[in-house]
Amino acid sequence: MNFAAQFLYFRVLKNRSPRHCSREDEDYDPFWQRDDNKIKRQDAPALCDLHCCKDGLIRNGLIGQKPPSINPERLKDFGEEDYLNGDVKTWEMKIVSRNEELIRDAHSCIPQSSSRTSLSSCNKLLRFEDISAAAFKIQCGVQKTPCMYSRLSKQYGMDIYLKKEFLQYTGSVKERGVLYLLTSLPQEQQRKGVIMALDSNFSMAVAYHASELRIPVFVIMSTSTSPARVKMCREYGATVISYGATAKDSQMHARRLAQENGYLYLEEEDSPVYLSGLGTVGLEVYEQVPKLDAVIFPAGGHCGLLAGSAAALKHLNPNISVIGVESESFPVLQQSLKAGHPVEDQACSNHHFYGDVSGLCFGSNSLQLTGKLVDKVVAVREEDILISMLRLLEYERAMVDAEGSIGLAALVAGKLPELKGKRVAIVICSGNLELHLLQQCIARALTLDNRLCRFSLVLSDSPGDISKLLEILAREETRVLDFKQERMFVTSEFFTVEVTCTVETRDKIHTAQLRNALLERYPTATWMER
């Protein structure tokens, strides 16, 4: 069998479901961690105690709704174990091949920067069984999001399946890594609490899941943070403190409070626990879409999702192509892979439109995994990202941000012609687009897609001339969005009016037809290029 040398441990609880567990089940926690040749039991509390009740699963405050579980036992070649009082049956499976070597070599220890807080040693191996254990552990707390066939398939000449991670409660895939990270903390640290100084999807996920797990959570935000983001973080359950004019001031204050009060200072990093949680996306995609040829992930500096999922997918089927996509403006991952270490001085953007796409490379572990397991990393333009946002909104009714749409942008830009005719999954990882950016993004995308155009021309200021122009626009079946007349500051002859008109067309061909019709009637018309 084409799998790595390892022991896979997985337990199926006969007559008991993880969705209906209770306090007494804490003695039968099915998750174990290997440290060298020793097996130690995790001291994390049972997650299902906080998400389940006797009447059914509590999901986002609702009782009785039971989202489908991740079901990693359906994946091939899992070891199984029935673990129950007085009724123990154990199967242990040893499978030998080369994929474990890939993951082991990729995860070689590289010293972490002293400025980063590490939750565990960097020399721990990210194993496939750790990812499968994470999948089982978090299934009560996160959604098993659909991976659905897309109407965009015909347009791009391949079978496209969209993994809709933006449907998580906080709108981000980061919930998977965060939940497994929080449940892995010692009980004493859970009692003391955690603190952050970030305005990101990671902080929102920590705010929500920490409050659900009854872990005190504090978020320090700068005074320049959007009021809507502050409100959202408070609604998720965090105690939000506004401090400092910059993010650096907030981080220094958060570290000081953590030291004084015993809080754990959290920032997004590539610890094996966090990567294992993110890697569960790869397990789900493999289960949901049979006979996959390729999976496309967002990349950039924060490539934990790409690295963790690649470890799972390459273990299950080495023939699946794993592709990362980042922005041309911030090719952090490509530069880091070329240099062989995380690039720290890469310029990045603080604009919320880009999110984690423009962040610095935050860890050598995920970088090494990416270098060994990811087949290809491509970069796309901002224009391609905007058009992919428009495509998802039109065809999938999905309002996603730049990070969520960047995977599809690689197909929009034609960067992956080798995938024509193949079965491809794209992870739509985030849907937290701020409202004040929504209108700007849509208008800009329509312009880039040749569906919004603007022209100006000079007419005689006499009855009937403007109506003739409108008749031409109606005959060409365009939709007038804006119509302005300028009489005071016209540089042409007297008694004329300069008209500037913005119209909506169907596509590039329709726009060309309108332009030809206007130039035939008004040769001096000026077409405003995008």
Image: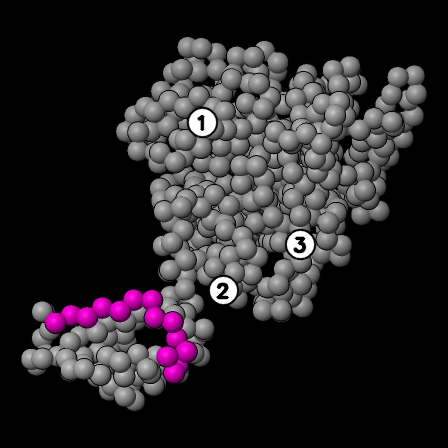
| Secondary structure of residue under mark 2 | loop
Instruction: Tell me the mark number nearer the camera, choosing from 2 and 3.
Output: 3
| Secondary structure of residue under mark 3 | strand
> Residue 450: x and y, percent?
40, 70
Query: In the rendered image, which residue does mark 1 sit on?
Result: 234
Query: In the rendered image, which residue does mark 2 sit on?
Result: 413
Q: Is residue 16 above or below residue 447?
A: above
Query: In the rendered image, which residue does mark 3 sit on?
Result: 148
**In front of the other: 437 or 336:** 437
Give, as a single range, the part of the protein colored magenta.
474-487
Residue at 41% across, 27% down: 197
Q: Amino acid at mark 3?
A: Met
Q: Dot 3, crowdedness within 10 Å: few (<14), some or many (≥20)?
A: some
Q: Are marks 3 and 1 in contact (CB under 8 Å)?
A: no
Measure how far apart labels 3 and 1 are at the Cα level. 33 Å
Residue 346 inside the magenta-drawn segment: no
Along the polypeptide, which appears first: circle 2 or circle 3?
3
Q: Is residue 441 above or below residue 492?
A: above
Q: Amino acid at mark 1?
A: Arg
Q: Residue furthest left?
A: 494
**In front of the other: 309 or 191:** 191
Along the polypeptide, which appears first: circle 1 or circle 2?
1
Q: Dot 2, crowdedness within 10 Å: few (<14), some or many (≥20)?
A: some
Q: Are marks 1 and 2 in contact (CB under 8 Å)?
A: no
Q: Is residue 464 left or right of residue 490?
A: right
Residue at 67% across, 25% down: 51
Measure how far apart labels 1 and 2 are at the Cα level. 39 Å
